[in-house]
Image (tube, rainbow, N blue to C red):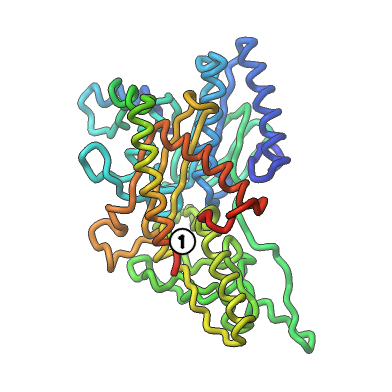
Amino acid sequence: MGNTVSVCTYGHAEHAWKKLQESMEKMKNGQKQKIVIGVGHPGATCQGAAFEYILNVYFEIKRKNLEKYADLIWLTNEYQLGDFAMGGAYVKFGGYIAPTKVFAESFLAERGINWIKQAGVHKIDKNKIHYETLDGEYHELDYDFAMLIPAFSGPGIKAFGKSGEDVSDKLFKPNGFTIVDADYTAKPFEEWKAEDWPSTYQNPTYHNIFAPGIAFAPPHTISKPQKSPNGTSITPAPPRTGMPSGVTGKIVAQNIRDWIKTGKPELKHRASMAKMGAACIISAGYGLTNGIAATMTVYPIVPDWEKYPEFGRSIKYTMGEPGLAGHWLKWFMHYMFLHKAKGYPFWYLLPE
Amino acid sequence: MQNINLERNKARGYSDFSQAPSATKRTQMLRKNWFFQAYRWMVLNIKILRIVAFGHS
């Protein structure tokens, strides 16, 4: 790409901030700016991070009273807003059980942010984003500032056995992610099951190789696969960052520790994404009183339609709530995780 | 593109277009009210800790 910015690393985020400031300077001079934020590939994931970014950009623009000079657009490959690459969720909302679509659309609509959904970006020029929508049509979108999250892939390394033979196909999927104890049998969406998802993250051929977090190859997406009439798959990949990465990393470390201590590969600790909950806080703003956040928990991450036939997830443990409380919670978690990362006293008591 | 203002105008004309819900003034006030949010903060902590407890075996 090169024409748009990203916020996936510290360096990228710093560069994005500089570019955004340039755009805001132009707005101060009365120049209208089109700001496009979202995902930059038909199969990209991390919609949550992009969603948080667009809300933060809106916050900055509003803080500087430049709203009338900014045209903010949310560009996503989700079938509908609030999918967040996990097929959306149902949450209790104002006395109803509503889909997260309502939750996400309302958050954008309240801020006057327009959106383009079901869009697979295939090319980006200096001032134009080219994308295809699920109906098979090709579109162009002008932009002055664009932050599009790229698609993830494995590192693309090759693996060789003892006698020098190429064993890459036993270790990696074509997308570069590591093969683990998942059920990779190709089957239609209606036949997907919670059991397809891995729980020990151990490679079935090489038992001393584990791939937790973002490293493992998921058996399939969580969102329903969608294809345009031109054959382009416009489906977000399953999200594995954040809480699932922390939890899977921990259980793999515990299993390896037990293996070393006992000498037996028992793999007692398990963490399947179909049996694990996750929390996500999309927080915008800064300071004690100025922020707002959308707090969301899902249980389980991967819907289990056999256990929860009505909504795919537990309605008791799946919730969504906008407000200042989530913003405080994210602030608190920020310092809590830094405390843990630095190994300060009692770090091990803090959850992932 | 989903244009918010255009959608609102279509909805005003009784068309069959869905419209994103907007928070009422009371909801917006509650989202920023310190006392209510302090209570919600405690509730969220409990709910997230419950999720953490279910996290793995």
Q: Position of residue A337 (x, y in %)?
A: 58, 48
Above or below, comparing residue A297 to residue B27 in the picture: below
Residue A278, image quadrant: bottom left
Percent x, y of residue A47: 50, 45
Question: In front: A28, or A60?
Answer: A60
As drawn, the residue found furthest toward the front would be A345
Q: Residue at x 61, y 76 (%)?
A: A256
Which one is nearer the viewer's eye here, B11 or A165? A165
User: Is A324 left, or right, of A177 in this rendering?
Assistant: left
Towards the viewer: A90 or B6: A90
Mark 1 falls on what kind of element? loop
Q: Chain of mark 1?
A: A
Judging by the rendered image, the residue that carries numbered circle 1 is A221
Quadrant housing residue A255 = bottom right
Identify the residue at image location x=46%, y=76%: A183
Outermost top residue: A29
Above or below, A181 relative to A176: below
Give the residue at the far right of this rendering.
Answer: A164
- Position of A90 with respect to A109 (left or right) is left
The x, y position of residue A90, in whole percent, is: 30, 49
Task: Indicate left or right for A90 with A288 as reference.
Answer: left
Q: Is residue A232 visible?
A: no
Residue at x 21% of width, y 42% of height: A96
Under mark 1, the amino acid is Thr
Q: Camera-side residue: A307 or A236?
A: A307
- Residue A214 image position (x, y, % from top left): 58, 60
Q: Residue at x 61, y 75 (%)?
A: A257
Q: Is B28 drawn above or below residue A106 in the view shown?
A: above
